[in-house]
Amino acid sequence: EIVGGLAKRMVKKAGVDMEVHLTLDRREALKDADFVTTQFRVGLLDAREKDELIPLKYNVIGQETNGPGGMFKALRTIPVIFDIIKDCEELCPNAWIVSFTNPSGINAEAVFRHTGWKKFVGLCNGPVGMIKDIEKLLQVKEDDKLEVKFGGLNHMVFALDVKLNGKNKNDELVHILSAVGKEESLANIYDIPFSSEFIEGFRHLGIGYIRYYLQKQQMLDHCLEDGKNGKCRAQ
């Protein structure tokens, strides 16, 4: 009812000619679908809290998309995705599955390696937030045409090529980032600034998750401090 009500309000506000039907019967929902989207969390937020806090007991970052926390979540999630695919094979064999379920990259890799299902896309909202960051940094106007080419895997995505009205803006974006720092679009990731020297050498805008790799010790210290106070992203 909560998610269904939200969906109905969004459709109404957008003025889209669409009917929203609510059901707890997955097979009923999947029958003859053209597209299937998933967004679920096995174990709910209680499990996420464990994903984040258990690794910290061993001085390792706890995070739901990478490291041991990501593997905890993957091992709970992948069997459910495989089960959904079995239903899709029977009820909507020509559908595209668009998965917004974390750990997005690991889930997609598992599907491609261990099922016969080929029409599967794993998504993260991070790149959309990165585009919004770039629009602000380059002061993009409403009638401008911004093109951003992304590379990498969830959750390690980079803006490889940025064009504004057909002109390459990579160097300008790096210069702005170096001068003012990047606006962090992912508010739930602790924002540790990168140095100007790093940005000039790195040459690309990366998703906030790269901090878990490239500023590993600082992120671990932050997570450990939060963990001592019983805090984490799940909470």
Image: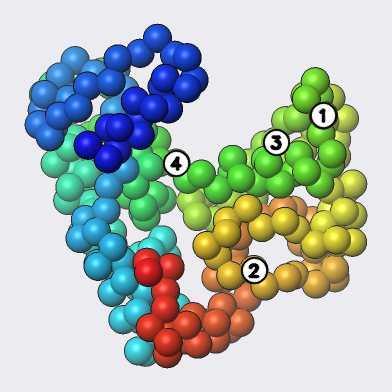
Q: Nearer the viewer, mark 1 or mark 3?
A: 1
Mark closer to the chain start, 4 or 3: 4
- Residue 52 placement: quadrant: bottom left
Q: Nearer the viewer, mark 4 or mark 2?
A: 2
Quadrant, the C terminus: bottom left
Mark closer to the chain start, 1 or 3: 1
Kindly check if marks 1 and 3 are in contact, taking CB atoms under 8 A apart as contact: no
Q: Is residue 191 above or below residue 229?
A: above
Inter-mark Cα distance, 1 to 3: 15 Å
10 sits to left or right of 162: left
Inter-mark Cα distance, 1 to 2: 27 Å
109 sits to left or right of 216: left
Q: Give the image location of residue 198, x and y in percent.
A: 79, 69
179 sits to left or right of 64: right
**What residue did someone put label 1 on?**
141
Q: Residues within 10 Å of mark 2 (few under 14, many from 20)?
A: some
Res 172 visible: yes
> In front: 151, or 6?
6
Q: Is residue 186 above or below residue 220?
A: above
Which label sits on residue 148?
3
Quadrant, the N terminus: top left
**What residue did someone put label 4 on?**
123
